[in-house]
Image: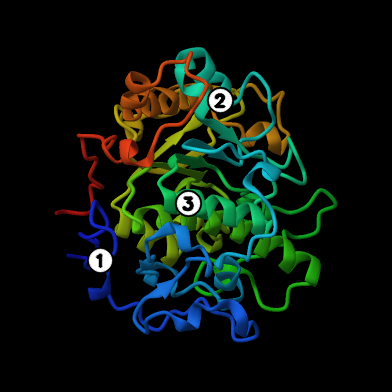
Amino acid sequence: MRGINPAVTGKPGEGNQTHDVRGINLAVPSKPGEGNITQGVRGTNLAVPGNPGEGKTQTNDLSWLQSVPHRLRSRLIQEALTTEPSDYGLPEGPIVLLLYAGPDNHTSLEMEIQRSTPWMTPYIVSLDILRDKQRHDMLHGQLYTHLCNKATQGNILAITGGPNCRTWSILLHKPQQDGTPGHPLRGRHEPHCWGFAGLTKRHSDKTDADSILLLRMLSIYDISRSAGHDPAFLLEHPADPADHSNEPSAHKCCSVWSTNALLSFSEKHNLTWATFPQCALGQHNGAKWTTIAYRHMEDMPNLNILTCNHTRHDSQTHTSAELARWSPGLNTAIACSLAHTLSDLQRGHNTSDSSRTIGTDNIETHKPSVQTIHPETEN
Ligand SMILES: [Zn+2]
């Protein structure tokens, strides 16, 4: 079975207990009041204590996190809420969550969604600290907890995102402008891929922050699946430099795609991977090789066949923000895929319906009919 959990679709909770969580416990010893300890010994519980209305116990197999350092895992515990979802601009009801969505301008994914599939617009929630430093900060435990609750409720229909890549980047291996050697913050292998020991506090905080942005995105999706829901998912990050960079030290460079956590997460959720140069999809900033891992992105073209045929690339735009932007073709593919996957949403609720009171029972029926299978996994 190779770690694929057959119980996650449709039957919440059932069967998860057969998977040993191998001692992973998200409860932090120094925070005895959290209440996670009262849960079963086999299952680690991410549910917030004192949410009696949920009616579901989230017993989730978190073995995909077992190689992640405890200091990071502890930050995936949900907080006791002292705020409302609306404090973070989160509407009631179902949302399509575009995390780390970049600046709000004409090159954004939601602008493409607005152009191509306007009926989806009322459901879109785009978060990025470039838009709102306070209310969009995924390092805030309150925002994260509200999103976890939405995931539990089945109110997250899709999650997309390309978390910060700055502390993972091959650019850190390059000599700096003053000629001094590069200064990578992570190693390639566990546990150094989560940050070298002995970093300055500033560097370790920055490295951990980027790790948390990644892990919280994965965790929200994982919580949704474990509660019996099946949202669309797409993670984007630079392709593994070991395979796609000419830098001499690329084989020593970290990559989210080579972490045990992401490999295990991908296997658990049966994600499909694709690696391609974004210039082949209309980005003018060079052959930036990118990998995406996704599920329920219906009609996603086979991006693995794309190659760079350019003899030169426009080198006028080089800021990291511009480089981080998804190419127009990728935005189009994602917008189309989401529209196809969530097409029942359109039929049930046209754009003139602003009440957005679609029930979660309804959402359960929106499961796509086509399964995309990772080439390396078999049923
Ligand atoms: Zn190219």
Between 172 and 1, the residue placed more toward the observer is 1
Identify the secondary structure beneath mark 1.
Answer: loop
Where does the image place residue 14, in percent across and percent down from the top left?
A: 23, 65
Q: Which residue is mark 2?
A: 110
- How many other residues sit within 10 Å of disc 3, few (<14), some (14-19) or many (≥20)? many
Residue 240 is marked as 3
Q: Would you place residue 363 above or below residue 208 in this image?
A: above
State if disc 3 and disc 2 touch (CB < 8 Å).
Answer: no
Residue plotted at (43% across, 49% down)? 153
Tell me the kind of residue under disc 3.
Asp
Relative vertical location of residue 74 with respect to residue 309 in this rendering, above or below: below
Q: The C terminus is located in which quarter?
A: bottom left
The mark nearer the N terminus, 1 or 2, is 1
From the viewer's perspective, is the residue at label 2 or at label 3 nearer?
2
Across and down, in percent, residue 3 comes to 25, 66
Q: Which residue is mark 1?
A: 3
Q: Is residue 169 visible?
A: yes
Residue name at image x 72 percent, y 78 percent: 198
